[in-house]
Amino acid sequence: MSGSVALVYDDSFLAYRHADWHPLQPRRVKLAVEEMGRSGLLDQAELVTPRLATDAELALVHDLDYVELVRKLGHGADLGFAHPDNPVFENMHEASALIAGGSLQAAELVHSGRARHAFNPAGGLHHAMRHQSSGFCVYNDVAVAAAWLREQGHRVAVVDVDVHHGDGTQAAFEEQPDVLTLSLHGKYFMPEVGHDFFPGSGGSEEAGSALVNVPFPRYTWDEPWLKAFDAVVPERVRRFHPTVLLTQDGCDTHLLDPLADLRCSTRIWPPVGRRFHDLGRALRRPLGGARRRRLCRGRGSAEGLDAALRRDDRPAATGPAPARPRELPAAGRAPGAHLARRGPRDRGGYRAARLIRGSRTWSGRPEPASKPTGGATQA
Ligand SMILES: [Zn+2]
């Protein structure tokens, strides 16, 4: 990666923590940043302290009534909302608004030209909808940042390679022709549990001039995944002529991910990082002549991708990836469960595997919700 780089982070991100038993644990963010430090990547980055997104900024994507509800729930109001994917937690609004604020800062840094690349390792909460939480996501920081950039006059291309469909981000911009949402994700039925892989949307028929979905069948491995990526992403992004590239680099396509069933390895990341880098170079100048720019954020590590580019340029593995060495019991797979990973610090797979093991806390069934489950899908 060339040009100045900003990392938006401090330990206050760790407040986004649903519960002890919950699969999305914030320590994965800290582990990722520590790994960046050990690898020397932070020597090249400006460290920026995150700030809270304001209500007005959240309202770019979310209903203010929903924001107020999240605030009340996080401050102890027992309004009957609970859900095993999105349990209420203390200071839920503040913790969520901090992640959205971090992604906004990344957007501001890139927009202003202070950074050419900016990264929020806690971001990527792409399932949150206008008026409800979903899939471990309370506020959709991806959509908030994209919406803010759009307000500044940008054409924004959002490329989401997380294993789950970026449904919340898609929903936020379905009517917006100047924000491209392009998602590659698993989409398949799971007969053993009787429902689709979360969130179940994102079929290829969900398409438009600024909407692209690339669904993968279960057990897709490196080569077909990369082939589809190469067949779709560069051409569609270039055709859109974006001024900002916003990438969601979730690496839960990995074969060790306990909550998804693709079979990719860390070897997809060097070529993905290279493609994103090439696309960043091709960005159109926005009105006002600001420099071309790329915004990287959440659910993975642009820095990790860059490190992978430099360290591991080996081609993708040939043939199917090996079977996952350990399966969680079915009881541990909550419907709609979503386990996000931070970046692939790829050194032949070992580092990424270590991070994944480190965050594998979803070892059993969720505890009963601490609050009544009526209205379960909201917050
Ligand atoms: Zn995911």
Image: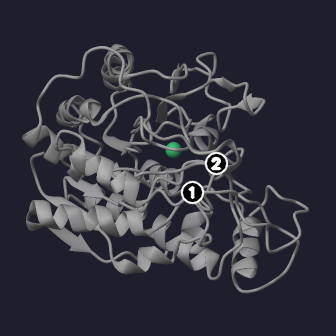
Left/right of residue 51 with respect to residue 38 in the rendered view = right
At label 1, which amino acid type do we have?
Trp
Please tell me which residue is depicted at 38% across the width and 52% down the height of the picture.
356
Q: CA distance from mark 2 to mark 1?
A: 10 Å
Is disc 2 in contact with disc 1, using a CB cutoff of under 8 Å?
yes
**SS of the residue under disc 1:** loop
Please state which of residues 241 and 265 is positioned toward the viewer in this rendering: 265
Left or right: 313 as drawn, with respect to 101: left
The residue lying at 52 percent from left, 44 percent from top is 258
Residue that mark 1 sits on: 362
Count of number-bearing discs: 2
For the C terminus, which image quadrant? bottom right
Q: Quadrant of residue 63?
A: bottom right
Picture quarter with the N terminus: top left
Where residue 111 sits: x, y (%)? 29, 56
Can I make out residue 53 in this image?
A: no
Up-down: is 287 above or below 41? above
Q: Residues within 10 Å of mark 1 (few under 14, many from 20)?
A: many
Q: Is residue 239 above or below residue 89?
A: above
Name the mark nearer the viewer: 2 or 1.
1
Q: Secondary structure at mark 2?
A: loop
Q: What residue appears at the point 21 percent right and 52 percent down from the top-left corner?
A: 303
Q: Is mark 2 within 8 Å of ligand 1?
A: no
| Label of residue 337 in the image | 2
Which sits in the foreground, 235 or 148?
Answer: 235
Q: Position of residue 230 (x, y in %)?
A: 31, 18
Q: Is residue 325 above or below residue 370?
A: above
Q: Amino acid at mark 2?
A: Ala
Residue 174 shows up from this direction: yes
Pointer 2: residues within 10 angstroms few (<14), some, or many (20+)?
Answer: many
